Image (cartoon, rainbow, N blue to C red):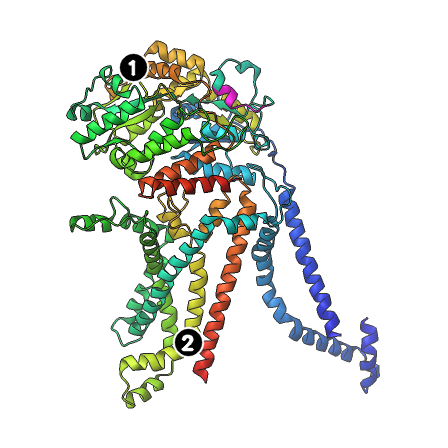
Amino acid sequence: MPTTTSAPVENATPAPSTGAAPRRQAWRNRLSRWDFKFSPYLYVAPFFLVFILIGLYPMLYTGYLSFFSWPAYGSEVGPWVGWDNYAHVLGDSVFRKAFWNTIGIFLLSSVPQIIVATILAALLDTQLRGRTLWRMSVLLPFVVAPAASAMIFGAIFADGTGLINQTLDVLGFPKVPWHADRFASWTAIATMVNWRWTGYNALIILAAMQAIPRDLYEAADIDGASKVSQFFHVTLPSIRPTMIFVIVTSTIGGLQIFTEPRIFDTNLRFQGGSDFQYTTLTMYVFNTAQTTTNPYPRAAAAAWVLFLIIVGIALVNFLVTRAVQRRSLR
Amino acid sequence: MSKISKSWRRGLAAGAVATLVAGLVGACGGSDDTGEQAKLGKDDTLTITTFSEFGYGDLIDKWNADPERPFKVKQTVVAEWDTWKQSLTTGLQSGEGLTDIVGIEGDMMPALVAEGASDQFVDLTDKELDGRWMESKYLEGQTADGKQIGYPTDAGPEAFCYRADLFEKAGLPSDREAVKELFKDWDTYFATGDKFKAKMPKTAWYDSSGAIAQAMLNQVEFPFQTKDQKVDVDNPELRNVYDTVAEHAATQSTKVEQWGEDWTANFTNDGFATIPCPGWMFANIKDSAPDVKGWDIVDAFPGGGGNWGGSYLAVPAQSEHQEEAKEFANYLTTAESQVAASKVAGNFPANLEAQSVLAEENATDPYFNNAPTSQILASRAEAVPAGVPFKGDKYSDILGLFQQAIRRVDEGTDPEKSWATFLEGVEGMS
């Protein structure tokens, strides 16, 4: 192979007697061309190899599994059943409850979370004393293990002996049925999520705010804009890309919420409340895998439905934010 | 040129993925259920998981302290059956992760002796052990074609435990003999509850709606499934249990969930006055309320008798030390071991010799006002109706849904609505 391709090169060189050096030269050229062409792929390859192994493969296998049955207490896959598992999941009222619970908890957490995080970031962006201390301390809840914080909140939201209900009782108000009432349980779980993620999002937004050129603010000052209108007309438009990132990640995270409701759950069989008041989609997947009727295939079907829901919502998210961005660029 | 190479590259990538997937699928599907057997040395460890209180702690300590022991044993104790049932189910279905011996609640046995599931366990049949256990218990651990999956550990003949001091305060008789009359049938039991509540409005009559539902359920002949394993939950007997419990939930129950923190707390703060009491419940009471004086046991049960619980020891096929596991399960269910375990946990042994040893000793329990506990349990065992309730292969799973339905009523859901959710849940199992 190399001899045939090197032949024309040899012909082109004026000194054919010293053939070895140009040949080496050509080889080197080719290497550097390959380097230029393929190295980038080589550098990103490890990620994709690992992704194929622990991301893509389980996903595809889950899809494959969702078309089979599974014998009770068996440890091997049963016969092919077509779309039966999807029909079961979509027809299951518990799945529909889990869907609305997830949406409810997601809205109760993501919306206030992002609003508060933005305001917090704007406050941290001012000339405070001990800025680093303040900035780091908002991240503190994020460092605490979610299981640990869920246990603390469990003590706060306990129905009989919880901090909030004890206080309400002393003040003469009726106790809140945190685990029995649907909305109350969503609020409790959303509180845990907000406590954990608000500071984290605030720091990301803060970083974006600090990248805004200061002369924009100086110009606004000269024009007589108040701090509030500076926030709305200078800060917010400048951090839009970061906001989109924060919104998308918190959407995906919010739809996959598991730890908080699971540890909040006082139910004996961890079904997310006796009437599935606060079972989420991921909890549904997890619990389905532990039943005895087609456990893994049904859980796999539910997981795929959840995946498609997330893709759908992310797509809507993307289109909406792009439309907003386009409009503001005009 | 570039087009060709692109499609070639795509083909290669697809091929690679396909090979990888096929390889891994093959690796998963091809794994054998039966673990490779390995002999245990003197310092190797055999593992066992039990739940609640089997009373094996001292026995295992003694076994490990013996220099002549053939191997070491490590026990894991899970607090609640429901939690352990989930892990056990996952372990069986994934074919890995279980200990060499597993404790199994009797209600789940019908599901495990069914075809398919029974392949997950080692046959423990041993001719030498014939006649060791109560016939009915032994047969419940056996498949239709005679494979023995579990060795019975205990049975759960039920008495009633009650707080004599609170009975006195409420103006009821409190003497062990005199209270028998109050527990003769369910109507009298609930009527007494009303009387008690009139005097003691702050104390509930019984520990939880779930326990009473369980007690009444254990007297229904075909609660969930007919003799030929057909699911039939919409029957009048089951509905009667449900309605009775739902009716009294508001007035007589603590409305807390069994085994939860609030449930445990109620043992000490005069939360309730009576609780259905199989032998294994004794340990629960003592652990929850070590300092409370006033607990007593009556040799009577509303509606005759009933059996609540009773467990088995089984060896999963995935165990790598099946021989040793079988040997140790045998050791734990000998008369000697069962007498020792019973003294710790209060369990009523399924081992016949252990039963007669305990009956002869006729021990009394100072905690329960010197009640002759073994005598009471033996007498209660005689009152258990044979073969009731019939437990089909889905018994344990439907029982979970039924308890969930009762729990919803406790939390304020309309009983009709909760029943409808229960029916839907059972429907979803098939």
Give the left or right position of residue A171, taking residue B302 as reference. left
Q: Give left or right: position of A142 versus A330.
A: left
Under mark 2, the amino acid is: Arg
Q: Can you say which quadrant of the picture contains the C terminus of chain A?
A: bottom left
Q: Quadrant of residue A2?
A: bottom right
Which chain is disc 1 placed on? B
Where on the picture, by quarter, is residue B322?
top right
The reply to whether dot 2 and dot 1 touch (C-beta < 8 Å) is: no
Magenta-colored span: B137-144
Chain label for disc 2? A
Q: Percent x, y for residue B107?
A: 46, 29
Element carrying mark 1:
loop
Q: Give the residue drawn at x 35%, y 79%.
A: A235
Q: Is residue B139 magenta?
A: yes
Residue at image mark 1: B372
Q: Is residue B355 magenta?
A: no
Q: Position of residue A221 (x, y in %)?
A: 29, 87
In the rendered image, residue A261, in percent from the top left (x then y), is placed at 38, 51
User: How many numbered circles does the render carry?
Assistant: 2
Rendered residue at 47%/39% (across/down): B426
Q: Position of residue B331 (x, y in %)?
A: 48, 20
Q: What is the three-letter code of the residue carrying label 1?
A: Pro
Q: Residue at x 35, y 54 (%)?
A: A186
Image side of residue B33 versus residue A135, left or right: right
Specify few, some or many for label 1: CA neighbours under 10 Å numbering under 14, 14-19, or 20 or more. Answer: some
Task: Using the rendered image of the protein, determine whether residue A188 is visible from the camera's viewpoint.
Answer: yes
Residues behind callouts 2 and 1 on a single chain? no
Residue B116 falls in which quadrant of the image? top right
Q: Which mark is residue A240?
A: 2
